[in-house]
Amino acid sequence: MSSRTVTCVVVGAGQAGLATSACLTERSIDHVVLERGEVAHSWRTERWDSLRLLTPNWMTRLPGGGYTGPDPDGYMTAVETARFLDRYRATIAAPVECGVSVQRITTSDEGRFEVETDAGVWRARSVVIATGACSDPHVPAVAEAFRPGTRHLTPIAYRNPDQIEPGRVLVVGASASGAQIADELARHGHDVTVAVGNHVRLPRTYRGMDIHWWMDRVGVLDERLHDVDDVERVRRTPSLQLVGSSERRSIDLNALSAAGVNVTGRLAHANDTHAQFSGSLANMLRSADLKMNRLLDQIDEFASATGLADEIGPDDRPGATEVPAAPLQLRLDDVGTVVWATGFRPRYPFLPDEWLDGRGRLVHDQGILPVPGAYVIGLPFLRRRASGFIDRVGLDAHELCDHLLSSTLASV
């Protein structure tokens, strides 16, 4: 098998891998970006038809390139995002090799890395894992209890309401994916029940501005690890209960109920005949409302302190989430499809076991692995609260490439 040598191998050509490539080029570090499919592969193949970014277009910024279109306050579709990343790749002349699957990464006795692929071997002094945090949708064990014939979908497999057969749809999870899919299915005439667990409620706009505009201005998105009490808890925070739409509408549980979605508690158990739901829904709703109002209070204080309060719209914070008469049971004979919007798990079958913890997660300190020369980028709260955003992954890339240059390559 042929082999080639390069200073750094980047695995993955999504936004994280391309941002890393731009930063490596800026530092004159020769490298290659290996991608199993096409650039922005997951944006092309693992998104439903109506999906749009949760962040406004003006926040689509990467090192050396950003959104320049006519609608900065709009929200890009998945297809538009893939095209943006394609153009970005060309702009930065990223050395991407598409259709190359990484099979194994090992460390040699000399401290170099051997990256085995189905197209040959790469030898490098450094590797950056940029495969993202959403490689495998998580489906809980309770799914096995549903009756045979029930159709099970994840957000990666869901495309549009036309693929859903008649019968009740149970959507498990009410963060961004679950809320958007439940809303879309209900608006297309399906009988939808959504099982709600821990979630983050926010209005799409507040006082006339997008909620992300406020979080950007206030500094929430750039909070670092030392700014929070429990980093691991924050890393597990569900995606924001938002949707990108031309009308800039909110998609909280009140909106879902108004669209005809039946809202109930967390799915706790299932047997051959019934699904059982937790009775703690009211507490979940109060907790989400409390956290939302804390952020809106912080925004109000910032607006007053900076003089923005005189320039922006009035306080239009949403009212409390209405507590529905939630069913605690659901007959499984009535359920034709279950959508498991229960999060994702990263998977690294090509990495040595000693790089991973007992749950298969990479062991790292702000993206720096214990193995000298090995890095990861694109994970939630890697270095800052918004590390997983297109808009902030470039900041992480700059910092990690500085570390790579000063530490890994200092002796070259």
Image (cartoon, rainbow, N blue to C red):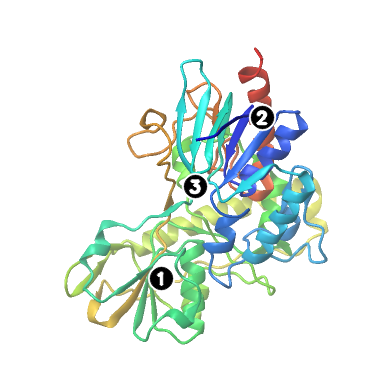
Other residues around mark 3 within 10 Å, as few (<14) / some (14–19) / many (≥20): some
Q: Position of residue 361 (x, y in %)?
A: 41, 38
Residue 93, above or below 138: above
The answer, for residue 316, to whether it is visible in the render is no
Q: Secondary structure at mark 2?
A: helix
For the residue pair 56 and 11, the one nearer the viewer reads as 11
| Residue at left offset 76%, top offset 44% | 93
| Residue at left offset 57%, top offset 72% | 49
Comparing labels 2 and 1, the label whose residue is closer to the camera: 2
CB atoms of marks 2 and 1 within 8 Å: no
The Cα–Cα distance between marks 1 and 3, rounded to whole angstroms, is 33 Å
Of label 2 and label 3, which has the lower sequence position? 3
For the residue pair 14 and 232, the one nearer the viewer reads as 14
- Quick one: quadrant of the C terminus? top right
The Cα–Cα distance between marks 2 and 3, rounded to whole angstroms, is 20 Å
The Cα–Cα distance between marks 2 and 1, rounded to whole angstroms, is 48 Å
Q: Amino acid at mark 2?
A: Cys
